[in-house]
């Protein structure tokens, strides 16, 4: 119960507010004094703010036909011969991805399966809220928070975002040493490791008890059982837990840069107009997953600007120092132009400063609301 309350508190307190978003959009980040994020690109937190308010990921996660939902319907104790009551219980943290036997015309069955599996890992949605938090010892968010004091975790998110754009970031899962498995990002031309995160984390788990639980027949027995359960929670042990979800999420995003998933990635591109938007293909895009996850994970302006530094640094390293094909270089250049603009183009260029319009709209809505 305490763990669930802590998760709920984090859900309520997290996420960037409009003031933070405006500062991020209108001020240079630390690595360059002359560069801003492109408000039409994937780094704009205003995009994910609107997607969050529109509940795109929430609806996709809880109601997608690609997910085998875990629920139960039981007859309630208040039921009578003439009137029936049922108790509906939904457990999204226990959802599974469907394994499609036949390919739909747009995506391969394998892509749909691993896409929805990754979505469940990234958005466990415990307590029926859109949430990245989980009580599991091997959850992806727990893995990131265990390394939150290291910039490696932000480079990991930056790598996943670039992989979703089709850029083949040389991130890998190293398994050469038993119990020494780790996520690694290191370029051949540099001794420095941008990511070096061990996949084994120490976890606290309740110790097993040999005392057999029994049904209670009275109030005193219920009290004794409650006290016994409380005592069990204090008897904990420490074990090393392998972070399976983190590994599989990295492997999924890494697979986007090669066939057969490379074709699927192009099929779920961002809509260019209202008609394509209404088709909803973007809802099955890994871009939606990672951009929405970053919005849920990074909850302050300072950390978001460090994340922007990470994206910019990786792009510069791969463009000017990493050996790759000319086609890949052109993709990196297009991504840089899509993600960043010169500071003088914020008001003088063709790009519109959308955050001003949204802030004005939000102000009018808040002023018109009856209750705060």
Image (cartoon, helix red, strand yellow):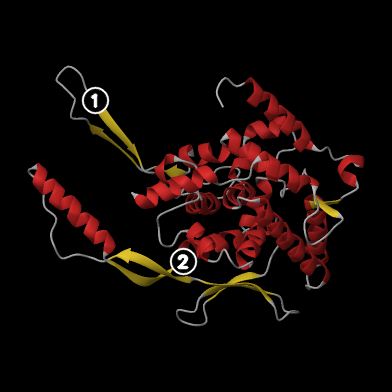
Quadrant of the image for the C terminus?
A: top right
- From mark 1 to mark 2, how far is it between C-alphas? 42 Å
Q: Which of 90 and 11 is in front in this view?
A: 11
Q: Can residue 150 be seen in this view?
A: yes
* Residue 34, horizontal then vertical, whole percent: 87, 55
* Residue 326, horizontal then vertical, whole percent: 83, 65
Q: Is residue 126 left or right of residue 170?
A: left
Vertical placement of 195 versus 369: above or below? below
N-terminal of the two: label 1 or label 2? 1
Q: Residue furthest top?
A: 82
Residue depicted at 69% across the width and 24% down the height: 364
- Judge the density around disc 2: few (<14), some (14-19), many (≥20) Cα neighbours within 10 Å: many
Q: Is residue 102 visible?
A: no
Residue depicted at 77% across the width and 44% down the height: 39
Q: Which of 322 and 239 is in front in this view?
A: 239
Location of residue 19 (image quadrant): top right
Residue depicted at 47% across the width and 50% down the height: 120
Residue depicted at 68% across the width and 29% down the height: 362
Find numbered disc 2 in the image and state the secondary structure of the residue it sits on.
loop
* Residue 68, horizontal then vertical, whole percent: 41, 44
Vertical placement of 290 versus 278: above or below? below
Location of residue 333 (image quadrant): bottom right
Residue 243 is marked as: 2
Q: Is residue 126 left or right of residue 206?
A: right
Q: Is residue 88 left or right of residue 222?
A: right
Q: Name the residue under label 1.
A: 85
* Residue 329, horizontal then vertical, whole percent: 81, 63
Q: Which of 261 and 161 is in front in this view?
A: 161
Vertical placement of 23 versus 197: above or below? above
Find numbered disc 1 in the image and state the secondary structure of the residue it sits on.
loop
* Contact between labelled residues 2 and 1, with CB atoms less than 8 Å apart: no
């Amino acid at each position: 119960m305490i763990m669930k309350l802590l998760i709920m508190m984090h859900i309520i307190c997290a996420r960037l507010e409009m003031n933070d978003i405006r500062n991020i959009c209108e001020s240079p980040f630390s690595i360059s004094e002359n560069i801003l994020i492109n408000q039409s690109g994937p780094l704009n937190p205003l995009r994910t703010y609107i997607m969050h308010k529109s509940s795109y990921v929430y609806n996709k996660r809880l109601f997608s036909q690609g997910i085998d939902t875990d629920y139960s319907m039981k007859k309630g104790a208040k039921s009578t011969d003439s009137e029936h009551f049922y108790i509906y219980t939904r457990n999204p943290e226990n959802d599974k991805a469907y394994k499609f036997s036949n390919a739909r015309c747009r995506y391969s069955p394998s892509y749909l399966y691993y896409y929805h599996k990754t979505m469940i890992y990234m958005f466990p949605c415990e307590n029926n809220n859109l949430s990245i938090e989980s009580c599991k010892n091997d959850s992806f968010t727990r893995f990131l928070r265990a390394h939150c004091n290291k910039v490696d975790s932000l480079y990991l998110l930056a790598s996943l975002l670039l992989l979703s754009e089709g850029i083949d970031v040389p991130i890998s899962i190293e398994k050469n040493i038993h119990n020494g498995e780790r996520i690694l990002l290191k370029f051949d031309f540099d001794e420095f490791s941008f990511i070096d995160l061990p996949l084994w984390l120490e976890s606290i788990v309740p110790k097993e008890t040999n005392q057999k639980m029994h049904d209670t027949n009275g109030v005193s027995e219920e009290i004794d059982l409650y006290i016994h359960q409380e005592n069990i929670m204090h008897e904990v042990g420490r074990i090393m837990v392998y972070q399976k979800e983190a590994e599989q999420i990295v492997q999924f995003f890494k697979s986007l840069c090669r066939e057969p998933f490379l074709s699927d990635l192009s099929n779920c591109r961002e809509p260019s107009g209202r008609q394509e938007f209404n088709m909803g293909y973007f809802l099955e895009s890994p871009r939606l997953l990672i951009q929405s996850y970053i919005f849920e994970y990074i909850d302050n302006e300072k950390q978001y600007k460090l994340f922007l530094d990470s994206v910019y640094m990786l792009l510069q390293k791969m463009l000017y120092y990493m050996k790759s094909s000319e086609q890949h270089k052109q993709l990196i250049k297009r991504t840089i132009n899509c993600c960043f603009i010169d500071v003088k183009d914020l008001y003088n260029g063709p790009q519109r400063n959308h955050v001003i319009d949204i802030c004005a709209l939000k102000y009018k809505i808040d002023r018109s609301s009856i209750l705060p």
